[in-house]
Image (cartoon, coloured by chain):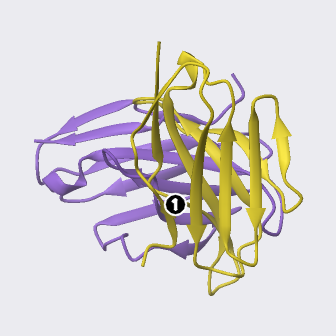
C-alpha cells in the first residue's frame, strides 16, 4: 500500500499521559499536514511541513502539542499531559508540489480517547 | 466568520433525486478548490477538483464562482452509495505564503430507497 499510513489506528490513554502518533506520507510528497477532527465537524488544521520545515502552526496547536518531520519523510505528533478535550481523530495528509494547486491525500487517522 | 461555510444538512433524498450542495469561502487569495467525500469513521477522500469553467465527472458536477466566492456540487440520479458527508475544501493562502487545505464542516447526505 503506497498511501498515507498512520499509527496507531486507535489510542486510549489516561488524562495527563503523553501520546505520540506517527504519519508516513506518500513517499515522493514534500508536503505534510496534521488535522484534528471531532464528531460533526470538518478536519481542523493543526500544522504544516514542507519537507522538514514546519511552516505553519494553527492557534489550535497549544504548547502541549509538538510535531516534527526530522528528515522530511515521516512525521510525529506528540501531545503532552493529555486532557479529555484532546479526544478526537487525528488525521495526517500529504501532497506534492509547489503553489496552491495540489490536492491532499489522507491517512486513515489515529482515534484518540482520553479517559 | 468561519473560513469555509457549508450547510451541515442532513439532506435526506430518495434514490434517483438530484441534490445540490453549496459552499462559500472568505479568502479571495484562495487558489484551488475541491470536494471531498467522507464516509462514517473513515478518512476524507478526494471526490473532484473544482474549476472556474465548471467540471463534470459522471453524475457529479462542480462549479466555482470566484467573484461570489462560492462553490457548488450537484449530484444527479442519487444512489444509496452516495450517502456520506461531502466536504468543501479551499487551498487557503496563509500570511506566510503557504497554501493550506481548509475544510468546511461538511454536508451530510442520506439517500433512501
Residue occupying the point 76% across, 73% down: B66
Does residue A74 sit above or below B69 in this rendering?
Answer: above
Quarter of the rendering occupied by the N terminus of chain B: bottom left
**Nearer the observer, A98 or B55:** B55
The secondary element bearing badge 1 is classed as strand
Seen as rendered, the residue at the extreme bottom is B95
Q: Position of residue A19 (x, y in %)?
A: 29, 47
Name the quadrant containing residue B30.
Answer: bottom right
Residue occupying the point 17% across, 50% down: A17
Q: Position of residue B40 (x, y in %)?
A: 41, 29
From the image, state the color of chain A.
purple
The chain to which mark 1 is attached is: A
From the image, state the color of chain B.
yellow
Seen as rendered, the residue at the extreme right is B53
- Mark 1, residues whose alpha carbon is within 10 Å: few (<14), some, or many (≥20)? some
Instruction: Report the residue marked by disc 1.
Output: A68
Q: Horizontally, is A78 left or right of A32 in the view?
A: left
Name the quadrant containing residue B97.
Answer: bottom right
Residue occupying the point 36% across, 70% down: A60
Q: Is residue A106 visible?
A: no
**Nearer the observer, B8 or A19:** B8
**Nearer the observer, A100 or A114:** A100
Amino acid at each position: 500500500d503506497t498511501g498515507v499510513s498512520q499509527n496507531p489506528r486507535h489510542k486510549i490513554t489516561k488524562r495527563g499521559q503523553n501520546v505520540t502518533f506517527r504519519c508516513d506520507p506518500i513517499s515522493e510528497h514534500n508536503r505534510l499536514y496534521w488535522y484534528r477532527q471531532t464528531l460533526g465537524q470538518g478536519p481542523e488544521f493543526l500544522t504544516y511541513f514542507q519537507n522538514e520545515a514546519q511552516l505553519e502552526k494553527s492557534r489550535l496547536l497549544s504548547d502541549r502539542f509538538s510535531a516534527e518531520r526530522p528528515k522530511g519523510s515521516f512525521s510525529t505528533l506528540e501531545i503532552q499531559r493529555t486532557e479529555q478535550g484532546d479526544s478526537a481523530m487525528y488525521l495526517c495528509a500529504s501532497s506534492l508540489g509547489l503553489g496552491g494547486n495540489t490536492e491532499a491525500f489522507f491517512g486513515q487517522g489515529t482515534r484518540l480517547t482520553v479517559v | 466568520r468561519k473560513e469555509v461555510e457549508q450547510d451541515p444538512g442532513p439532506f435526506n433524498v430518495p434514490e434517483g433525486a438530484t441534490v445540490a450542495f453549496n459552499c462559500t469561502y472568505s479568502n479571495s487569495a484562495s487558489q484551488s478548490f475541491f470536494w471531498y467525500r467522507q464516509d462514517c469513521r473513515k478518512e476524507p477522500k478526494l471526490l473532484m477538483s473544482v474549476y472556474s469553467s465548471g467540471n463534470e465527472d459522471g453524475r457529479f458536477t462542480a462549479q466555482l464562482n470566484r467573484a461570489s466566492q462560492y462553490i457548488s456540487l450537484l449530484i444527479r440520479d442519487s444512489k444509496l452509495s452516495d450517502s456520506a458527508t461531502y466536504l468543501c475544501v479551499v487551498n487557503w493562502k496563509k500570511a506566510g505564503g503557504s497554501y493550506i487545505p481548509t475544510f468546511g464542516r461538511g454536508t451530510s447526505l442520506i439517500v433512501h430507497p
